Amino acid sequence: MNKENVEKTTQIDENGYIIYGWMVEDLKLCSPQVQIYAIIHKYSIEQDKLYTKGISYLTKYTGYSKPAIINHLKKMVKKNLIDKRVIYKNNVRLCYYSVYRENGECLLPFNRYLDPDFKFAKGSTLEENIKLLQEENKTNRELKKQILNMEYKNFLRTPYWKTIAMYLKSKHHFCTICHSDKALRVHHSTYVHHGEEALHLEDLVVLCNECHKKFHGIKNNKEEK
């Protein structure tokens, strides 16, 4: 994955579908495949979600004919960019699509927890989400590699880091240094385990904004480090 394209957005339309730079740069998608992919991606970012709106919706959105849409979907399935699932309801054959396989395997060019749009299951707790991140770190060596290849500012915007930061602030309500409860942020005391923060929460400390600035010796810092 081109780390500079993780956050780069090339288009946001009136329906809220986002075409990220990595969809063009890393997946090499062009029109109408990139529009089709953006729609399927949007419906896949929540756990266990599928694109279920059918071919007609894609033809209306892209302006391409039904045969053309079907052809492009077949090509993307063949390239393992999306997963196709056939489901029968009331003896009617339905085709659903996702950027995740049924077994949970991620087809994105990077881990799902690094996808800025990823959302954990509705109603899940921070404790449950932290356990998911810890299990991912234990079983998927690629996660750490992908984090290390990211620009740090992009890492700070991932669901992976945001979940860890929220979890720690929910457990530690005061700055470790001055005990203030205002403008708290999470700081790395060491980067030895960068990419495996979920497994090494002891490497992280909660600081208020002022103590965080003093620690770094900077006047203005808007990101949690």
Image (cartoon, helix red, strand yellow):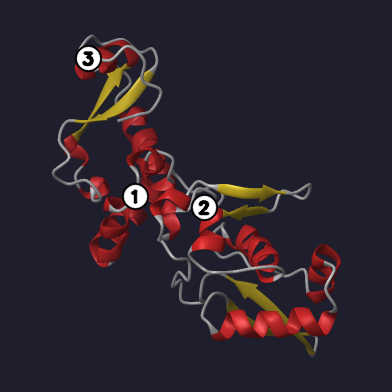
The answer to whether any part of residue 88 appears in the image is no
Q: Position of residue 20 (x, y in %)?
A: 57, 54
Left or right relative to 74: residue 207: left
Name the mark on residue 63.
none
User: Quick check: 208 above or below 50?
Assistant: above
User: Quick check: 45 above or below 180?
Assistant: below
The kind of secondary structure element at disc 1 is: loop
Q: Position of residue 155 (x, y in %)?
A: 37, 43
Which residue lies under the disc numbered 1? 150
Give the Cα distance between marks 1 and 3.
Answer: 24 Å
Instruction: Decide which of tag 1 and tag 3 comes sooner along the chain.
Output: 1
Which residue lies under the disc numbered 3? 217
Q: Name the residue type under label 1.
A: Met
Q: Position of residue 92 (x, y in %)?
A: 80, 87
In the rendered image, the residue lying farthest to the bottom is 91
Question: Badge 2: few (under 14), some or many (20 or more) residues near its Cα, within 10 Å?
Answer: some
The kind of secondary structure element at disc 3 is: loop
The kind of secondary structure element at disc 2 is: loop
The answer to whether any part of residue 20 appears in the image is yes
Which residue lies under the disc numbered 2? 118
User: Quick check: 117 above or below 40?
Assistant: above
Instruction: Decide which of tag 1 and tag 2 comes sooner along the chain.
Output: 2
Q: Residue at x 64, y 67 (%)?
A: 37
